Image (cartoon, rainbow, N blue to C red):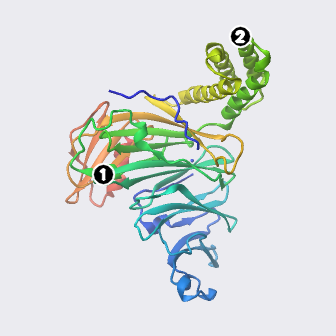
Amino acid sequence: MRRRVSALLAIGVIALLAATGAGASDLARAHDASGVLYEVVPGTLEVLFPRNGASSATGSFPALALDMTQPGGASERLLVPGTEASALDLDPTLIIDPQSSSLFLLWRSRTATGRSSLWLATLIDGIWHETTRIGSKELNLDGPPAVTLLRESEHRTVLHLLWSEAESTGAARSYYSPLVLFRGRYIGWSPILTLDSLDLHDAGGSALPENLSIFGAPRLRRGVDDGSAIIAFASPSTSHLVSARSRILPPALITLADEARNHLVGVGVRRQKTALAAEVRTFLNQLDVQLHDATRSYLARSAYVFIRAYANDFDSLEVLGNALRWHLIAEGATLLGQAFTAVPTHCGILAVGPGAMRQALPTAHYMEICVISDLSLPALGFGSTNIHVSRDGTKAVLTREENGAIYFRQSLGDAWSDEKRLPLGAGQDPQTAIDTLVDSL
């Protein structure tokens, strides 16, 4: 039996893809559009920067350096800020945004306890601007998160992060965090979403499979357009495979919702319910925002209906205004989501922003996360397993490797195919064959 769905995941709170299966040296090297090679080099302070005269105490500390090599051969080495301490810095991943000329370095810092923290440093025009910890808690990471950077507009991009953490049961749980970048700068704070919250089946309804590796293999890829990402993961709580679409909502929608709230509060004390609804509708129809006229008209009408239906159910105009704001954001997200052919089963809104410590006004960036597919896991043989998903999130392939052979099952509506052996030609790369299979679905 499904639990009741909340309409909003109201949590206070994309071009380059770093391939999940690549080796560390691949993830830690990148070229920008001008041909400059960036490479992360691990070592100790005294080895990386011997001229600094570091004392024996600090010189033995592990650190990360960033080497920048020009096409002509000239090079420069920079210390990555935040890595010059006793913690071990692992799994550096470089991401370059060619449009903003920004370079982002993501790594995990592991302490003596074996737990890790995720860090993000930003380099713009050869200068480090900020180093930020992702989340406030230490994580139980075994490797780097999957990451893809997708551009939503001229000034705004989102770094999508996906990873799993091992648990005492032997399974792993998957987590997702969207990092919003505005004009190449990280806005300063992002939520971490436990992906099990997207699975609406009752926990414990299905037994865990014998092969638990499927839970530590979440998948992240670019969606059908440049602004959406597809997430696929196996939930240890319900033994279901879930795929979801994540995208950032256009700022014009948030502006309209904000203005609707503010106008309602400002004029509401002088209006009866019907007059107030009509006043807000007229205001929104005349509002200068970058939304299609039909979209704005639809939302203005939706505001009118909402106010007339619920104005008497709230204790104050401020509370009614906040409810109207969330209603318009959700309605706008649903309307704009009609451009996608994959029909979601349910959606939620995730708010992303610097929070009260950095910004007094309400957060201005919102992600819509929609579940596209939700299937019970099939029987899995032994061996290392992986999840693969189509760009629209509607189809999935599960692969496992055993004794040098690769076997797969593919989703067929609400069921799974029988397991088959993946045919490989002489010298054919297995990953290429898998990608071809998934993209053909």
3D distance between C-alphas at marks 1 and 2: 55 Å
Residue under numbered circle 2: 274
Residue, disc 1: 171
Amino acid bearing label 2: Thr
The quarter of the displayed image where residue 287 is located = top right
**Considering the image in quadrants, where does the C terminus appear?**
top left
Examine the image and state in which quarter residue 286 appears: top right
Please state which of residues 31 and 363 is positioned toward the viewer in this rendering: 363
Q: Residue at x 71, y 44 (%)?
A: 360
Q: Is residue 64 above or below residue 370?
A: below
Q: Amino acid at mark 1?
A: Ala
Residue 254: quadrant of the picture? top right
Q: Which residue is rendered at x = 66% and y = 32% of the image?
A: 253
Numbered label tally:
2
Q: Which residue sits at x=62%, y=73%? A: 71
Label 1 neighbourhood size at 10 Å, few (<14), some (14-19), many (20+)?
many
Circle 2 residues within 10 Å: few <14, some 14–19, many ≥20: some
Give the position of the N terminus as an image quadrant.
top left
Give coordinates of residue 418: x percent, y percent.
21, 39
Do the residues under discs 1 and 2 have CB atoms within 8 angstroms?
Answer: no
* Image x and y of residue 409, in percent: 26, 42
- 147 to 440, vertically: above or below: below
- Closer to the camera, 132 or 179? 132
